[in-house]
Amino acid sequence: MIKKKYTNNDIYEFLHKEICLTKVMPDMTTDELRAKESDPYFWKNLSELLECFRICDACHKPMIEGFCIDDGAEHYCSPDCLHTQMTNEEFEEQYDNSNGTSYFTNRYEDSMTYKKGE
Ligand SMILES: [Zn+2]
């Protein structure tokens, strides 16, 4: 069920492209973005400008794929982060063979990059 598509580098590459396309803020290189990795305030502010990523509720880093709990009430970027809040069994129960309110996602609808089909 869990198919990770992106590495940490991909996340910053993706956000760099999104910032270029949306122009919500002055352009930042992937290195500049990566340097902000541990700055939760930066990500919180950016998440209010860009809809295309989420912030992990456990490690507070940006994520473009991961666990979406209870229809978006919580997000976790990795199994390790998920397991700070619930076990695999609890997650599987909420996932309920994709009939539940929790799932793993690697795509957010409102991304400029995806819209351009790049
Ligand atoms: Zn995390």
Image: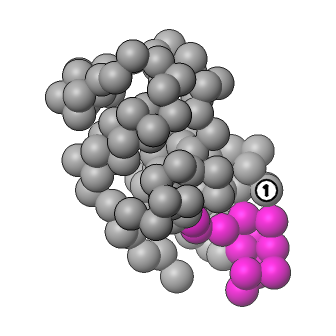
The residue at which mark 1 appears reads as 71
Residue 100 vertical position relative to residue 102 in the rendered view, above or below: below
Coloring basis for residues: one colour
Q: Residue at x 53, y 49 (%)?
A: 112
Judge by depth and name the residue closer to the eye, 102 or 16.
16
Q: Amino acid at mark 1?
A: Asp
Residue 16 vertical position relative to residue 29 in the rendered view, above or below: below
Q: Is residue 99 magenta?
A: yes
Disc 1 residue lies near ligand 1 with CB under 8 A: no
Residue farthest along the left direction in this orientation: 31
Q: Secondary structure at mark 1?
A: loop
Residue 97: x percent and y percent?
72, 86
Residue 43: x percent and y percent?
49, 24
On screen, residue 7 versus residue 5, left or right, reads: left
Binning the other alpha carbons within 10 Å of mark 1 as few (below 14), some (14 to 19) or many (20 upward) gives few
Quick check: can you spot residue 85?
Answer: no
Residue 42 vertical position relative to residue 17 in the rendered view, above or below: above
Magenta residues span 93-105
Quick check: can you spot residue 113?
Answer: yes
Q: Tell me the quadrant of the picture where the C terminus can be found.
A: bottom left
Judge by depth and name the residue closer to the eye, 62 or 56.
62
Residue 113: x percent and y percent?
46, 53
Q: Residue at x 74, y 50 (%)?
A: 72
